Amino acid sequence: MAKKSMIARETKREALVKKYAAKRLELKTIINDQEKPMDERFRATLALAKLPRNSSAVRLHNRCQLTGRPHAYYRKLKISRIALRDLGSAGQIPGMVKSSW
């Protein structure tokens, strides 16, 4: 089980990314538009820099939804390899059989 503080930090980041997604997209379109005047694009760059750093989607890290483990994460299932193995052993995942010999 991951530290509760790390799970909470990641949840907080997810909320910030959702909250500022539209604003960031709007500013980035202004910045990347070569037709706009340079001073307007520069002001948009400064406004983007003033937004919270954790509102950037790049700062998100995938974590297992059951344990919070950050490593060995299966994107399709949204769980870690260890949680997948435990669920497979318990027969919780249809069609999955853990081999043992």
Image (cartoon, grey):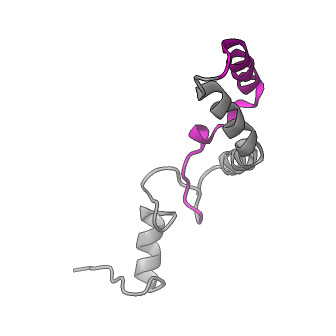
User: Please, which residue is most extreme toward the left here?
Assistant: 101
What are the residue bounds of the magenta stretch? 36-65
Work out whether 23 lies above or below 3. Answer: above
Residue 30 sits inside the magenta stretch: no
Work out whether 91 lies above or below 19. Answer: below
User: Which image quarter: residue 76?
Assistant: bottom left
**What residue is drawn where x is 48% and y is 84%?**
92
- Residue 49 point in image, percent of width and height: 71, 23
User: Which image quarter: residue 101?
Assistant: bottom left
- Pick whichever, 92 or 18, lies toward us: 18
**What residue is drawn where x is 48% and y is 68%?**
77
- Residue 47 point in image, percent of width and height: 76, 23
- Residue 4 point in image, percent of width and height: 69, 51
Magenta-colored segment: predominant secondary structure: helix
User: Please, which residue is most extreme toward the top here?
Assistant: 39
Residue 26: tell me if it is visible. yes
**What residue is drawn where x is 36% and y is 86%?**
95
Work out whether 14 lies above or below 74. Answer: above
- Pick whichever, 20 or 65, lies toward us: 20
Residue 55: tell me if it is visible. no
Number of marks drawn: 0
Residue 57 sits inside the magenta stretch: yes
- Residue 9 point in image, percent of width and height: 70, 44
Determine whether, in the image, residue 83 is placed left or right of residue 65: left
